[in-house]
């Protein structure tokens, strides 16, 4: 019975390399997109509340503080959401590696691909660092906390993810072969 459950969980699990690539891409997209979104809504709220709109029909400052102002405050939760996305992808990749059904002979291919993804993540991390240097986005990005640390040190995280994934891939294959 236990062997059947393990085999059902391992069904169609061919590897974890694409999950590592998704970790890199979705991580930078989430943090960059959320930072620009927070900046944009903050700028919009500031301009609407301090704007010099002259309308006799409505008080734009009051309307803005009740609508866009509340939305702008809620946008700060995107910082936590980006951290949850990154940590979730990290853990999900490790789980996918454990249930991978590739033969251990392919480990050298995984090592080569991990090295290529580390090199790719260096460029992504450098692009993120130059985005952090922007005076408008710097205070917003520095408030991302865990996500900022992960993307800033992305090559280290990808190396850790790759080699832990390889280890879990081998361990998962050995455990499933003993159960069957």
Image (cartoon, grey):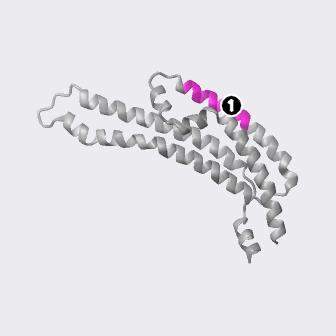
Residue at coordinates 58% horizontally, 30% vertically from top-left?
128
Few, some or many residues within 10 Å of mark 1 (<14, 14–19, 20+): some
- Looking at the rendering, which quadrant does residue 12 occupy? bottom right
Residue at coordinates 37% horizontally, 43% vertically from top-left?
74
Q: In this image, 39 relative to 83: left or right?
A: left
Would you say the magenta stretch is mainly helix, strand or loop? helix
- Looking at the rendering, which quadrant does residue 38 occupy? top left
Q: In this image, 157 relative to 65: left or right?
A: right
Place of residue 170 in the rendered image (x, y in percent of width and height, measured from the top left): 81, 55
Against 81, residue 37 (above or below) is above
> Which residue is identified by label 1?
122
Q: In this image, 31 relative to 174: left or right?
A: left
Residue 145 included in the magenta stretch of the image: no
Place of residue 25 in the rendered image (x, y in percent of width and height, measured from the top left): 61, 41
| Residue sitting farthest toward the left | 56
Instruction: Please report the bounds of the magenta region as a residue range.
Output: 118-131
Check the picture and name the quadrant holding the C terminus. bottom right
Against 57, residue 90 (above or below) is below
Residue 120 included in the magenta stretch of the image: yes
Q: Is mark 1 on a helix, strand or loop?
A: helix
Total numbered badges shown on the rendered structure = 1
Residue at coordinates 12% horizontally, 37% vertically from top-left?
57
């Amino acid at each position: 019975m236990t062997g059947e459950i393990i085999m059902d969980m391992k069904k169609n699990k061919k590897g974890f390399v694409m999950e590592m690539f998704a970790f890199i891409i979705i991580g930078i997209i989430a943090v960059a997109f959320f930072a620009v979104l927070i900046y944009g809504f903050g700028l919009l709220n500031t301009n609407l509340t301090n704007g010099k709109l002259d309308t006799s029909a409505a008080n734009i400052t009051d309307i803005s503080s009740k609508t866009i102002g509340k939305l702008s405050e809620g946008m700060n939760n995107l910082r936590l959401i980006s951290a949850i996305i990154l940590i979730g992808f990290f853990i999900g990749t490790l789980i996918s590696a454990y249930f991978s059904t590739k033969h251990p002979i392919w480990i050298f291919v995984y090592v080569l691909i991990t090295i290529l993804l580390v090199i790719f993540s260096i460029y992504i991390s450098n692009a993120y660092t130059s985005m952090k240097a922007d005076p408008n986005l710097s205070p917003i990005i520095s408030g991302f906390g865990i996500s900022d640390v992960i993307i800033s040190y992305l090559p280290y995280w990808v190396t850790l993810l790759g080699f832990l994934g390889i280890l879990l891939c081998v361990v998962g294959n050995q455990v499933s072969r003993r159960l069957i």
